[in-house]
């Protein structure tokens, strides 16, 4: 059911070389291409709209869920809703990813809404990788929406990576944190050619002791455009930090807009933003090690996004 | 091995031309340990950059092992066998010490082999190998990693620009040993820019540069006595080290 192109894309977005262990749901060209559930993790298709519900029993420890999506048919447009119900005290890893292979002339687009309901004291590591390839004129478009609702004492770490080949992306992430909840976001983004990427975060710290750390590292090459919009809202005694660190190359444009809103005297919020080109002396140093200018640039960019 | 022929380097300033290196002639023979010294602003770092290809002479020629390298770029010279440890090492966000040493060695060194180079410069390898070469490292740590990258390259010509700067006393003792060992083991020549008497004391040859010119040049025996006690050879730190010499 899964062809070679799809297999390669699965490797790119989910590091999957074979059928994953644990629970999974593989979606290719709008269809379910494979699913596995476990005693603790159930996956059911939605009836009213496209998408799945993933239910993780309270206390589930050290299990993982993989939900990769592959689009290899040019011109396909889909809108998918995936809801994650993560039981109290569980400790799990969720790997999502979307890869588009478009060698046709029509645009391919995957829009997904992921909603996470993170139970009390649950721990989640979420990894999301986006990737595009194919030499057709058709665009590869990904618009992910992510909503995270975190109950007391829960912890979530989100790693969002988009390194190559996505022509247009608009990602919106909102998070609401209750007492003692902690959210860590690490976003890595690279745009090239005439790509366009917008990333928007709104994190509301609603409970005492809630904390968030939202960090984006990005590289904009060629004539691409990036906008990073991150807003932390402190509604309780809480702490938050957001940072955008970007390398600009070629004739790219970057707009970084970190925002802080404090509605409580004890919210401690910090933002940092830095945009700059690769320092000439970094390139020179690597050239003295025998690298060409292009190789030096590549090393610096890869290191920065690692 | 390396020859500079009538090399000049001028820069354009508001007030007009400024000559930083003036018609310099210098030959560095095979298997030599040369120390260049002289007052700050004399043109020592500029000379090193001219050798590495980071700056190009306004006139004159540079030859390396018989080849005219005057018009060659940095990469080409590096691949011919010229290495350069910067006076002010560069930081890289995200690049690990291990990555940098592997890039320098031009092969996928094992972690253990990469650690050897760090231990050589007195860094406890285990603690450093996975560190990023970023602002979290102190100036002295960075300086030693910089030296380790040149050791890892093991090329015919190694140039070190003030390797002692920012390095504490204990490490400084080790640093001297690093250069002494390097001198034993390397097939090439070593050129060190330094103000340190202890480094000058192990030179085969000493070259004094001031105001863009070579003002003195000769064997250690010829040059060192006249330098001792002068400001150009011994800075404030140097006096401190001199005091500890007998230990
Ligand atoms: N690219 C440059 N443009 C202008 N002035 C320079 C440049 N490079 C070096 N200089 C000047 O040349 C002189 C010699 O510098 P440098 O080679 O760093 O000396 P040293 O290493 O002996 O202290 C200094 O006055 C320095 O400011
Ligand atoms: Mg200097």
Image (spheres, coloured by chain):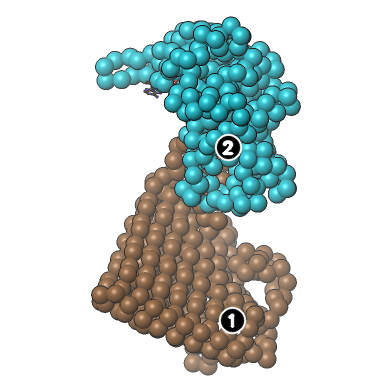
Chain colours: A brown, B cyan
Q: Quadrant of residue A7?
A: bottom right
Q: Position of residue B213 (x, y in %)?
A: 45, 10
Which residue is depicted at the point 36% across and 56% down? A273
Q: Quadrant of ligand 1?
A: top left
Which residue is depicted at the point 42% across and 80% down? A180
Tell me the distance, in whole angstroms, between the alpha carbons under discs 1 and 2: 47 Å
Could you tell me which quadrant the C terminus of chain B lies in?
A: top right
Q: Which residue is mark 1?
A: A91
Report in which chain the residue with disc 1 lies. Answer: A
Q: Is residue A285 visible?
A: no
Decide which of B190, A24 is in the foreground and name it: B190
Residue A200 appears left or right of B110: left
Q: Position of residue A2 (x, y in %)?
A: 69, 74
Which residue is depicted at the point 73% across and 48% down? B112
Q: Which residue is mark 2?
A: B170
Could you tell me which quadrant the N terminus of chain B lies in?
A: top right
Residue A115 appears left or right of B245: left
A222 relative to B169, above or below: below
Decide which of A253, B143 is in the foreground and name it: B143
Q: Quadrant of residue A125?
A: bottom right
Decide which of B21, A31 is in the foreground and name it: B21
């Amino acid at each position: 059911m899964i062809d070679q192109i799809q297999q390669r894309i699965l490797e790119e977005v989910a590091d999957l070389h074979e059928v994953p262990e644990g629970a999974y749901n593989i979606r290719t060209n709008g269809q379910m291409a494979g699913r596995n559930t476990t005693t603790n993790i159930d996956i059911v298709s939605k009836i009213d709209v496209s998408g799945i519900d993933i239910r993780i029993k309270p206390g589930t420890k050290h299990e993982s869920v993989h939900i990769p999506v592959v689009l290899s048919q040019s011109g396909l447009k889909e809108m998918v809703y995936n809801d994650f119900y993560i039981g109290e005290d569980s400790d799990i890893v969720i790997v999502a990813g979307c890869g588009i292979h478009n060698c046709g002339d029509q645009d391919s687009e995957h829009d997904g809404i992921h909603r996470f309901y993170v139970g009390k004291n649950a721990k989640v590591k979420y990894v999301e990788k986006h990737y595009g390839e194919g030499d057709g004129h058709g665009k590869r478009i990904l618009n992910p929406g992510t909503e995270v609702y975190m109950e007391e004492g829960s912890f979530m770490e989100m790693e969002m990576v988009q390194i190559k080949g996505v022509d247009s992306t608009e990602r919106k992430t909102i998070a609401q944190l209750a007492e003692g909840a902690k959210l860590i976001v690490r976003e890595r983004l690279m745009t090239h050619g005439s790509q366009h990427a917008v990333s928007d975060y709104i994190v509301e710290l609603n409970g005492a002791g809630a904390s968030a750390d939202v960090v984006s590292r990005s590289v904009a090459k060629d004539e691409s455009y990036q906008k990073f919009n991150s807003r932390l809202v402190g509604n309780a005694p809480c702490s938050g930090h957001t940072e955008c660190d970007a390398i600009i190359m070629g004739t790219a444009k970057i707009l970084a807009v970190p925002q802080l809103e404090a509605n409580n005297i004890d919210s401690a919020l910090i933002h940092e933003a830095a945009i700059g080109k690769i320092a000439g002396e970094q390139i020179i140093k690597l050239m003295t090690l025998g690298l060409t200018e292009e190789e030096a640039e590549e090393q610096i960019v890869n290191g920065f996004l690692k | 091995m390396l020859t500079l022929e009538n090399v000049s380097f001028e820069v354009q300033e508001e007030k007009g031309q400024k000559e930083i290196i003036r018609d310099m002639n210098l030959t560095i023979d095979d298997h030599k340990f040369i120390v260049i010294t002289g007052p700050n602003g004399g043109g020592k770092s500029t000379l090193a950059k001219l050798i590495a290809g980071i700056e190009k002479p306004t006139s004159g020629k540079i030859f390396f092992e018989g080849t005219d390298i005057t018009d060659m770029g940095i990469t080409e010279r590096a691949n011919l066998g010229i290495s350069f440890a910067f006076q002010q090492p560069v930081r890289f966000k995200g690049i690990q010490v291990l990555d940098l040493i592997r890039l320098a060695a031009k092969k996928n060194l094992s972690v253990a082999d990469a650690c050897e180079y760090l231990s050589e410069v007195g860094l406890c390898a285990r603690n450093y190998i996975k560190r990023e070469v970023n602002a979290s490292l102190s100036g002295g740590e960075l300086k030693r990693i910089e030296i380790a990258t040149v050791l890892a390259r093991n090329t015919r010509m190694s140039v070190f620009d003030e390797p002692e700067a920012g390095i504490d006393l204990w490490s400084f003792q080790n640093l001297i040993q690093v250069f002494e060992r390097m001198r034993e083991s390397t097939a090439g020549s070593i050129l060190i820019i330094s103000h340190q008497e202890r480094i000058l004391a192990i030179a085969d040859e000493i070259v004094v540069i001031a105001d863009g010119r070579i003002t003195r040049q000769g064997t250690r025996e010829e040059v060192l006595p006249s330098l001792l006690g002068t400001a150009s050879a011994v800075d404030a730190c140097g006096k401190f080290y001199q005091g500890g010499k007998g230990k």
